Amino acid sequence: HWGRAELARRRERSGQMGFGQLLEALDPGPDPQSGESPLLAAVAQRYRAALIDEFQDTDPIQWRILQQAFTGAGSEHLLVMVGDPKQAIYRFRGGELATYRQAAAAASTSYGLTENRRSSEALVAGLNALMRPGLVRSGLDVPAVEAKARKGELLLAAGESPLQTLPVEPA
């Protein structure tokens, strides 16, 4: 495509690099034994720990970069990944459920958030019932959470439910 080629030419001429090009340049490739990147080695030497928030938005290239810099045999690094696999289904910023699952399988320890400290007990109970079957198409379980909010109760009109669903007829 002419636009992409022109953008690449202009970036090269000006010495500029976009975020995508930076990731591509750092990508160790699918084979972790393909060789060590001096930049990733420097990152690994400088930082002993990495905290990756919103990990569900991590794409395969970013995960390979993190693996190269912070994991591997004999690694003394701490890599903390915080994310929600239920959000990975949206593929935000190139993140994908397969990458999340691959990283989760590689983790030595996993913790879940089992308390909801924001919502009323009635709303949490309704959401737990709604999500009990899990996300069937993606094969994700949705564990129940416990309502732990310490605030006023939700005031509803007589006969109203905190979680209301509307029937949708298939087209």
Image: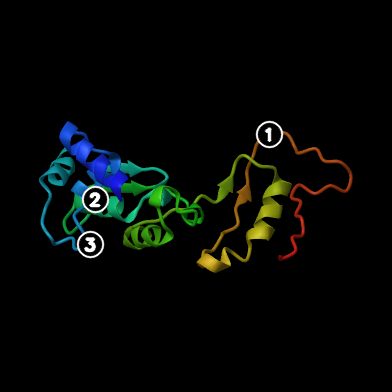
Residue 155, quarter of picture: top right
- Tell me the distance, in whole angstroms, between the alpha carbons under discs 3 and 2: 10 Å
Which residue is painted at 32% across and 56% down in the image? 60
Residue 53 relative to residue 133: left or right: left
Q: Work out whether mark 1 precedes mark 3 in sequence or the reverse, and give the earlier one.
A: 3
Q: What crowding class fits label 3: few (fewer than 14 Cα within 10 Å), some (14-19), or many (20 or more)?
A: few
Residue 145 relative to residue 61: left or right: right
Q: Which residue is mark 3?
A: 30
Residue 47 appears in the figure: no
Identify the image quadrant of the C terminus: bottom right
Which residue is painted at 56% across and 60% down in the image? 142
> Which disc, if any, is residue 65?
2
Q: Which residue is mark 1?
A: 151
**Amino acid type indicated by mark 2:** Ile
Which residue is painted at 71% across and 66% down in the image? 170
Between 160 and 143, the residue placed more toward the observer is 160
> Which disc, if any, is residue 119?
none
Q: Secondary structure at mark 3?
A: loop
- Image coords of residue 151 (percent x, y): 68, 34
**Amino acid type indicated by mark 1:** Lys
Circle nearer the viewer, 2 or 1: 2
- Image coords of residue 76 (percent x, y): 19, 49
Q: Secondary structure at mark 1?
A: loop
From this view, report whether residue 21 is shown above or below residue 13.
below
Q: Residue furthest top?
A: 14
Q: What crowding class fits label 1: few (fewer than 14 Cα within 10 Å), some (14-19), or many (20 or more)?
A: few
